[in-house]
Image (cartoon, rainbow, N blue to C red):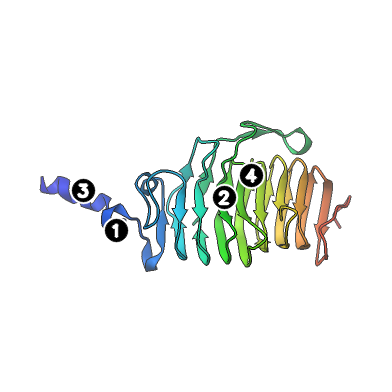
Amino acid sequence: MKKLLAIFILGLSGFGVFGIACADDGVFAINDVCDNFGCFPGDTGGLPITITSSGSYQLTSNITSTSTTTNIIEINADNVTLDLNGFAIIGPRTCTGDNTTLVCTNGGMTANGISASARKNIVVKNGSVKGFDTAVALTSLSSRGNVVKNMTVSENEFGMSVIGGMITNSSANRNLDTGFSNGLLGHLFIKDSYAHGNKNFSAIAITCSNVYFVVNGSDNCVHYTNESTCGTGSACP
């Protein structure tokens, strides 16, 4: 009995009171266990995992969903850092082909991987998101200071939609519509990034610096260095 109790306690050792997952240094953990009962205060069991307080959050496992209508992580607070910590958020959409031949399942799905509307100073970093309507959606004209870095998004309708911020050191590959986008609504700066095989557009943004767009629907191969706008072209230098 004591042995079973010890194993049970050890199994919950990464969780706080009532199963709340908390990583080191006050960083809240998000994983495929805690999403069943609530990962931290303000989050209830099941998807979406809802962040309602400023702070730092970190994935400690991959999270996979089969829903075409439910977001995985919703950020409902300003000043949030979400570190995917090398893990992936995976939805039900899959794609075959590349560029103009790209065909994807689950047409009309509305589920996003990571979503934050009208929020400021959101950082999403260090992982991958695939198989959604939009992989990373940081939207609204009132958004400011949002940053996506070290992220890979693939096989979504839209890869990254970021308003009032920056995408850096990231890649968008084989998305059905656009790799990087400001949603035609606000400022977006893209730096040190790469888009390949997106069906319609590599990027819709205000400024690009050291960015390669290769074999997307709107261009064949373009390299932007300190350009004021992200247009289209025909050849990489």
Q: What amino acid type should be assigned to the residue bearing mark 2?
A: Ser
* Earlier-in-chain disc, 3 versus 2: 3
Question: Toward which corner of the image does residue 125 lie, by quadrant?
Answer: bottom right
* Earlier-in-chain disc, 4 versus 1: 1
Q: Nearer the viewer, residue 163 or 142?
A: 142
Residue at horizontal 65 percent and vertical 32 percent from the top = 107
* Quadrant location of the N terminus in the rendered image: top left
Question: Which residue is denoted by mark 3 in the rendering?
Answer: 7
Residue at horizontal 83 percent and vertical 53 percent from the top = 222
User: Within 10 angstroms of label 4, few (less than 14), some, or many (20 or more) residues?
Assistant: many
Q: Mark 4 to mark 1: distance in Å?
A: 34 Å
Asked if residue 93 shows in the view, the reply is yes
Assess whether mark 3 and mark 1 are in contact (beta carbons under 8 angstroms).
no
Assess whether mark 4 and mark 3 are in contact (beta carbons under 8 angstroms).
no
Kindly report which numbered mark, 3 or 4, lies closer to the viewer in this rendering.
Answer: 4
Find residue 128 and name its label.
2
Question: Which residue is denoted by mark 1 in the rendering?
Answer: 16
Asked if residue 87 shows in the view, the reply is no
On the image, the x and y values in percent for residue 163 come to 67, 59
Question: Which residue is denoted by mark 4 in the rendering?
Answer: 154
Instruction: Return the residue found at the far right.
Output: 234
Residue at horizontal 60 percent and vertical 36 percent from the top = 109
* Earlier-in-chain disc, 1 versus 2: 1
Q: What amino acid type should be assigned to the residue bearing mark 1?
A: Gly
Q: Mark 1 to mark 3: distance in Å?
A: 16 Å
Kindly report which numbered mark, 1 or 3, lies closer to the viewer in this rendering.
Answer: 1
Q: What amino acid type should be assigned to the residue bearing mark 4?
A: Ser
On the image, the x and y values in percent for residue 221 come to 83, 50
Q: What amino acid type should be assigned to the residue bearing mark 3?
A: Ile
Q: Secondary structure at mark 1?
A: loop
Q: Is residue 196 above or below residue 68?
A: below
